[in-house]
Image (spheres, grey):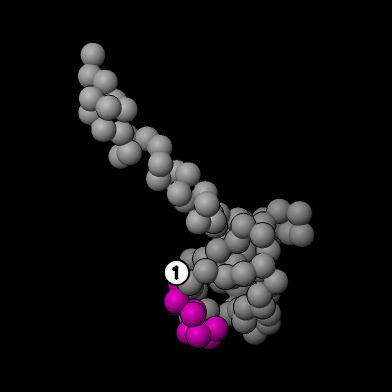
Amino acid sequence: MSNAKVYQGQSFLDKVIETTGDIENGFKMSILNGLSITNDVVIGQELKTTEVTLKSIVSIFNDKKRPATAISMEQMQEIESKGIGYMRIGSTFIVG
């Protein structure tokens, strides 16, 4: 077991994939760190990791290439305020 630092844009599950290669280790790492798999993590936070399960996946990542799929609340609000789910027929969506 070792520790891994969270970098900008990373979610908890990004760290699971980066450090173990297998998303199924998410539950083990969540218990190990006292977190839910959906908890937000912060830049610089140290997470305890489990064993590497898929070395072929872990080998893809390095200091210049990391998974980073987390989005901020600002980004989420921007996404939610656009698209079909946001449109109103006759107001912002005109049926032609």
Q: Counting other residues with Cα less than 10 Å from the Cα at mark 1, is it few (<14), some (14-19), or many (20 or more)? A: few
Q: Residue 78 in the image: x percent, y percent?
A: 48, 44
Is the residue 16 above or below the residue 56 in the image?
Answer: below
Task: Give the SS element for disc 1.
Answer: loop
Can you identify the residue that label 1 sits on? 38
Q: Which amino acid is tagged 1?
A: Thr
Q: Is residue 22 magenta?
A: no
Which residue is at the front of the view, 43 or 19?
Answer: 43
Q: Residue furthest front?
A: 91
Residue drawn at x 76%, y 54% as measured from the top left: 64
**What residue occupies the far top of the structure in this picture?**
96
Q: Is residue 7 left or right of residue 87?
A: right
Quarter of the picture holding the C terminus: top left
Q: Which image quadrant: the N terminus?
A: bottom right
Q: Quadrant of residue 87?
A: top left
Task: Examine the rendering and report whether any part of residue 22 can be seen.
Answer: no
Q: Tell me residue 15's x, y (percent).
A: 59, 67
Foreground residue among 56 and 33: 33
**Which range of residues does the magenta coloring cover?**
30-37
Compared with 33, 55 (above or below) is above
Q: Nearer the viewer, residue 73 or 69?
A: 73
- The residue depicted at 45 percent of the width and 76 percent of the height is 36
x, y percentage for residue 84?
32, 34
Position of residue 28 relative to residue 58, above or below, is: below
Estimate the x, y position of residue 48 in percent, counting from the top left: 62, 81
Is residue 33 on the magenta stretch? yes
Q: Left of 2 or right of it: where is 54?
A: left
Q: Residue furthest right?
A: 63
User: With respect to residue 90, does 18 lie above or below?
Assistant: below
Count of residue discs: 1
